């Protein structure tokens, strides 16, 4: 959490790119730049999984060439600080599979929550709705991201959210240790 993992076009289309390419993307594209995106468009939501993003003015391109051998270290839960946010929902955010997993507030703050909870609370997460959140997050040069633990229309109505499920297992072969006594 806290890594750049894409961008949002003026029309609200979400462009996803792996977080490992976030630094390259942030160097190549700035807010307001015109871009050309090549990738796979989702059917149900305004979203695209990018294979390449090019800054039209500079010609700089960020290309997803597949996963690296060893991923760079990401922000750990220990790096997150207690945070609160309050504002109006600007737009809904989705995961790479199109599942609702958060919102962007009008002040630029991103509120993330587990997809099952986002689906359950989808009426509260509609654009234009007031929203208050509490949780842990990070703030940096590209904005604030908060993983919600409490959510409501205002601070007085916030209720606790169930904890997020553990991250999925990594892809690829799984190594299992064998007992020494075999």
Image: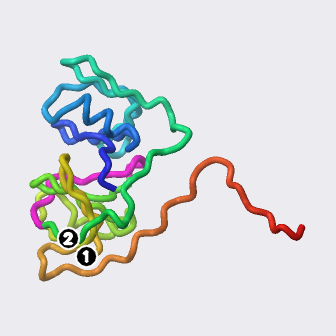
* Main secondary-structure element of the magenta-colored stretch: strand
Q: Where is residue 31 in the image (x, y as percent from the top left)?
A: 15, 36
Name which residue lies at 18% across and 25% down. 34
Could you say which is closer to the camera, residue 23 or residue 126? Answer: 23
Q: Give the range drawn in magenta.
A: 86-98
Name which residue lies at 28% across and 42% down. 14
- Which quadrant would the N terminus be assigned to in this image? bottom left
Q: Is residue 159 above or below residue 6?
A: below
Name which residue lies at 26% across and 17% down. 59
Tell me: 49 left or right of 80: right
Look at the numbered disc 2 and give the secondary structure of its residue.
strand
Could you say which is closer to the camera, residue 52 or residue 157? Answer: 52
Q: How crowded is mark 2: few (under 14 residues within 10 Å), some or many (20 or more)?
A: many
Q: Which mark is residue 150?
A: 1
How many numbered discs, if any? 2
Question: Outermost residue toward the front?
Answer: 180
Residue under circle 2? 133
Look at the numbered disc 1 and give the secondary structure of its residue.
strand
Tell me: 114 left or right of 172: left
Q: Where is residue 123 in the image (x, y as percent from the top left)?
A: 23, 66
Name which residue lies at 59% across and 49% down. 171
Q: Which picture quadrant has residue 8?
A: top left
């Amino acid at each position: 959490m806290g890594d750049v993992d894409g961008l949002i076009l003026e029309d609200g289309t979400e462009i996803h790119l792996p977080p490992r390419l976030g630094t390259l993307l942030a160097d190549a594209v700035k807010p307001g730049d015109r871009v050309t995106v090549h990738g796979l468009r989702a059917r149900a939501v305004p979203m695209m999984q990018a294979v390449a993003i090019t800054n039209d003015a500079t010609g700089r391109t960020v290309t997803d060439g597949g996963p690296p051998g060893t991923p760079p270290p990401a922000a750990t839960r220990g790096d997150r600080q207690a945070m609160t946010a309050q504002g109006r929902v600007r737009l809904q955010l989705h995961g790479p599979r199109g599942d609702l997993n958060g919102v962007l507030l009008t002040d630029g703050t991103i509120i993330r929550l587990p997809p099952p909870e986002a689906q359950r609370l989808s009426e509260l997460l509609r654009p234009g709705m007031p929203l208050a959140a509490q949780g842990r997050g990070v703030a940096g040069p590209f904005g604030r991201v908060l993983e919600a633990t409490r959510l409501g229309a205002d601070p007085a109505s916030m209720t606790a959210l169930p904890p997020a499920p553990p991250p999925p297992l990594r892809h690829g072969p799984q190594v299992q240790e064998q007992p020494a006594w075999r």
